[in-house]
Image (cartoon, rainbow, N blue to C red):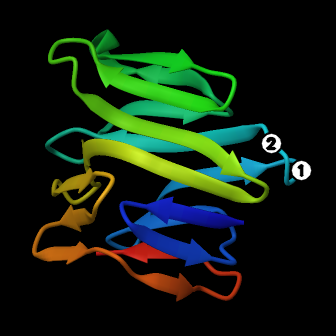
Amino acid sequence: MDIEIGSNLYRNTNGTVEIEGVPQISLVLKNPQGPILVNCVLFDEVGRVAVKIVENSLAFNERRAHELTKTATGLLLKNTETGKVALQVEFKAPDRVVFKQGAFLTMKGHRFEASLTEWRVEKHRMSGKDIDVQGKAVAIG
């Protein structure tokens, strides 16, 4: 599966996105035509689990701080207080998934942000790259 994060394309991934060495997002396509299944864990400021998504459903939502909206092609997770998008993932083409936007804390308490043009975490940022990860996880940060 190929994953787009920001303007970066990661080809031939195993569907896992590791941020700062921690597997934080898992994307699964049961067949190349979709639908996509998202598994994700988001953390709070001290590294505790704040939100857990299992196969496109909220399994844990501390203080009901997030709301999940499912679409025919993906899902959208928003912070209920601020309205900001924590995670937006969509199926784009056969065997390709797009992480359209998002902003959340990593397990280490650093802010990860993705937009249509780049991703950034701590002092790391990437834009416009095309990387073949050869069946491994996408490594960010």
Type of residue at label 2?
A: Gly
Please tell me whether mark 2 sits on a helix, a strand or a loop. loop
Point out the residue furthest to the right here: 31
Residue at screen point 33% across, 53% down:
116
Q: Which residue is mark 2?
A: 34
Could you tell me if the residues under marks 2 and 1 are in contact, i.e. CB atoms within 8 Å? yes
Q: Residues within 10 Å of mark 2 (few under 14, many from 20)?
A: many
Position of residue 3 measured from the top left corner of the image (x, y, whole percent)? 57, 63
Name above or below for residue 65 compared with residue 13.
above
Task: Give the quarter of the figure containing the N terminus.
Answer: bottom right
Judge left or right: residue 25 versus residue 92.
left
Closer to us: 32 or 47? 32
Q: Amino acid at mark 1?
A: Asn
**Count of numbered marks:** 2
Tell me the residue that label 1 is attached to. Answer: 31
Name the outermost residue toward the left: 123
Q: Residues within 10 Å of mark 1 (few under 14, many from 20)?
A: few
Closer-to-camera residue (58/140)? 140
Residue drawn at the location 65% of the way across and 67% of the way down = 2
The residue lying toward the viewer, choosing from 38 and 33, is 33
**The label number, if any, that marks residue 57 in the structure image:** none
Give how far across and how far down residue 90 sits, in percent.
58, 40
The image shows residue 130 at horizontal and vertical percentages of 49, 83
Q: Which quadrant would the C terminus be assigned to in this image?
A: bottom left
Instruction: Tell me which residue sits at (36%, 41%) in the image.
Output: 42
Question: Which residue is at a point 20% across and 65% down the rendered structure image?
Answer: 121
Q: Name the element at disc 1.
A: loop
